[in-house]
């Protein structure tokens, strides 16, 4: 099968023929129908998180079960699914505490794996490897989607949508009437805005440097927009909220500077949720006296602490009710052969989710 391998940092991916091993007994092989590009893919390609090529990326996947291992239950060949990078055992202390994203004993891969004769095994990052025609994933990474749901819309549920939505609801616990800002409105932040709207927040400020997306931010639920390049964003937030600090700021960009500023945007007793994953060496300077004295909370979260068996079906229901918008989050679509153009597009202002579409016979 073909896969788009990252062979060197900050360079185009290389589409190559690779071998994909058969699924293990608890795994399934999927024909990938759609894989959207997430900021995390771009961060790995830049070397932000210290992984060296060659490796395979792509982790917002929707597709069809092509082969199922002998112990797989609840999934059969032909099922349409979304696959996430969250791989959990379901019974460790973290899984039982509704934190499957922190599972301490995730099932090891017992099949799959990609290789070439020259390289041997190639690393598949984030448990998925969706920049390829097929993937092998554990059955617990997959959630069935309805027949009428498009693969491209479903693929978004694999990472960006669950992270933003769950960060706002499970971690931020936004309540009706609260004042909210989302700082850094990318594929995660836009869904925190949608979640804030659905939760009944009264003020929802989108803070982002890309003013060309203001209309999209408002369509998703933002009641105001602030461009931090146009002046003091902390001051602008207070002015937009009747001179008060906000109840909650959700930070969608992995940046210490933005996190520091977010603490200045909340009221005493308010909270900041870190949704975007900062680079490994990104250190913040915080006035801890302010955090303590003003009882401000700074909360980290990985993937919004999503519990995929609860949250993905709930999001599909919200999508079918017209509450969560997915189709209008997609700005561009490209065939797999044009994946490098797709990645360039994802980096440009004005683009939101960029989806790679695959052509399989019979799907
Ligand atoms: Zn992602
Ligand atoms: Zn676990």
Image (cartoon, grey):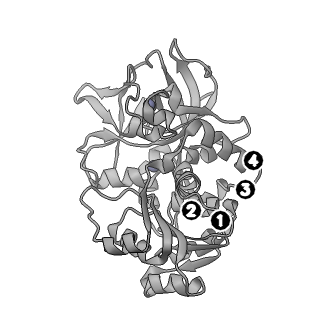
Who is closer to the viewer here, 288 or 181? Answer: 288
Up-down: is 328 above or below 263? above
Could you tell me if residue 259 is visible in this image?
yes
Residue in the image at 46% along x and 54% along y = 342
Who is closer to the viewer here, 176 or 189? Answer: 176
Residue in the image at 59% along x and 35% along y = 309
Q: Quadrant of ligand 2?
A: top left
Up-down: is 353 above or below 74? below
Instruction: Name the disc covering residue 236, or none.
Output: none
Residue in the image at 30% along x and 39% along y = 55
Distance, label 4 to label 1, CA atoms, is 16 Å
**Badges 4 and 3: C-beta atoms under 8 Å apart?**
no
Distance, label 4 to label 3, CA atoms, is 8 Å
Distance, label 2 to label 1, CA atoms, is 7 Å
**Res 5 quadrant in image:** top left
The residue singled out by tag 4 in the image is: 320
**Badges 1 and 3: C-beta atoms under 8 Å apart?**
no
């Amino acid at each position: 099968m073909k896969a788009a391998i990252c062979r060197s940092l900050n360079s185009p991916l290389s589409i190559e023929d690779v071998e994909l091993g058969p699924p293990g007994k608890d795994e399934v092989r999927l024909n990938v129908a759609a894989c959207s590009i997430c900021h995390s893919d771009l961060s790995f390609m830049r070397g932000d998180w210290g992984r060296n090529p060659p490796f395979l990326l792509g982790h917002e996947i929707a597709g069809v079960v092509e082969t199922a291992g002998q112990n797989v239950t609840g999934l059969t060949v032909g099922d349409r699914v979304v696959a996430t990078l969250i791989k959990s055992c379901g019974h460790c202390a973290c899984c039982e505490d509704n934190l499957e994203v922190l599972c301490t004993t995730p099932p090891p891969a017992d099949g799959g794996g990609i290789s070439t004769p020259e390289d041997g095994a190639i690393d598949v990052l984030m448990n998925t490897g969706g920049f390829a025609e097929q993937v092998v994933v554990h059955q617990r990474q997959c959630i069935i989607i309805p027949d009428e749901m498009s693969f491209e819309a479903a693929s978004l549920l694999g990472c960006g949508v669950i992270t933003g939505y769950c960060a706002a609801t499970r971690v931020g616990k936004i309540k009706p009437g609260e004042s909210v800002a989302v700082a850094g409105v990318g594929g995660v932040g836009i869904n925190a805005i949608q979640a804030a709207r659905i939760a009944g927040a009264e003020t929802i400020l989108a803070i982002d440097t890309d003013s060309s997306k203001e209309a999209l931010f408002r369509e998703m639920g933002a009641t105001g927009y602030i461009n931090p390049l146009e002046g003091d964003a902390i001051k602008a937030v207070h002015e937009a909220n009747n001179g008060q600090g906000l109840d909650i700021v959700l930070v969608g960009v992995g940046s210490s500077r933005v996190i520091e500023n977010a603490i200045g945007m909340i009221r005493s007793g308010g909270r900041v949720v870190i949704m975007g994953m900062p680079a490994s060496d990104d250190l913040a300077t915080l006035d801890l006296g302010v955090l303590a004295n003003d009882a401000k909370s700074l909360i980290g979260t990985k993937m919004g602490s999503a519990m995929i068996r609860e949250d993905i079906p709930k999001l599909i229901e919200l999508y079918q009710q017209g509450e969560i918008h997915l189709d209008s989050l997609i700005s561009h679509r490209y065939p797999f052969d044009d994946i490098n153009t797709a990645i360039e597009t994802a980096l440009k202002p004005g683009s939101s989710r960029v989806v790679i579409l695959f052509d399989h016979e019979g799907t």
